Amino acid sequence: MVEIEYKKARIRLGNTDLVYEPAEDSFLLADAALGEAKPGMQILEIGTGSGFVSAVLLANFKGIRLVATEINPHAAICAKMNGVEVIRTDLFKGLRPRRPETCFDLILFNPPYLPTSKEEKVPGWLNYAFDGGISGRETLDRFLDEVRDYLKPGGEILVLISSITGLDAVKAKMKELGFAVEVVARKKVSFEELIVVRGKLL
């Protein structure tokens, strides 16, 4: 089994035909999350995949409570192997909103952000890691519409997007939903720029 070592964490990967292999977007979000997390926080990662980002946080912070969700059953098994508490569900569906146990200080999401037509869909579960719909923002928009119900007052979100997703559209939607918005990390990769956007609940 392939293993990745990153920032004190050792992450085991499953079958990469079934589970998204951590790449530049995963590393950028993990680095941004390390800059935002603090000991004692309650943290939620939506769509954890292999559990890479969550495992990095768990390896670097003691005393955080971290839970993750994941729709792909193969990825959920992989994340559990990496020590991540995983609920297998679509985005927030397996969580009950506005409960003390489901209100978080920090919520992380690396959504599928590639604009995808019907002809471009990937067969099987791996499609959930790539398919952002026609706009590239369909899954992110669903996330943003629900995320306030799972944040503590003053809580924060970190979302990773691509320049081809439309940074201005993402920032506008976040502001409409009551977030103070700031770009906290970016990296040029091939034909796109990867961007981590922080939203702080006002």
Image (tube, helix red, strand yellow):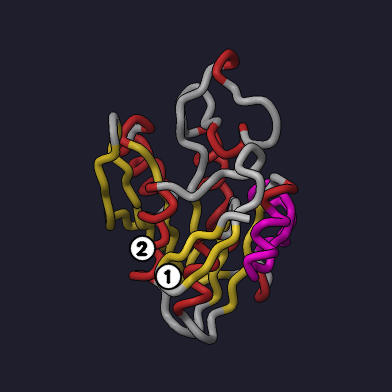
Residue plotted at (61% across, 32% down): 127
Q: In this figure, which residue is indicated by the disc labeled 2?
A: 31
Quarter where residue 126 is shown: top right
The three-letter amino acid code for the residue at tag 2 is Asp
* Residue 136 relative to residue 199: left or right: right
**Is 155 drawn above or below residue 20 in the view shown?**
below
* Residue 177 relative to residue 47: left or right: left
The three-letter amino acid code for the residue at tag 1 is Gly
Residue 57's spot in the image, x, y percent? 48, 71
Residue 114's spot in the image, x, y percent? 46, 30
Q: Cα distance, mark 2 to mark 1?
A: 21 Å
Span shown in magenta? 76-97
The label shown at residue 135 is: none
Which one is earlier in the sequence, the residue at label 2 or at label 1?
2
Q: In this figure, which residue is indicated by the disc labeled 1?
A: 154
Residue plotted at (65% across, 75% down): 100
Of 172 and 94, nearer the camera is: 94
Residue 35, magenta (yes or no): no
Name the quadrant of the C terminus: bottom left
* Residue 27 relative to residue 54: left or right: left
> Could one spot residue 32 in this view of the protein?
yes
Dot 1 alpha-carbon crowd within 10 angstroms: few under 14, some 14 to 19, many 20 or more:
few
Residue plotted at (48% across, 48% down): 110
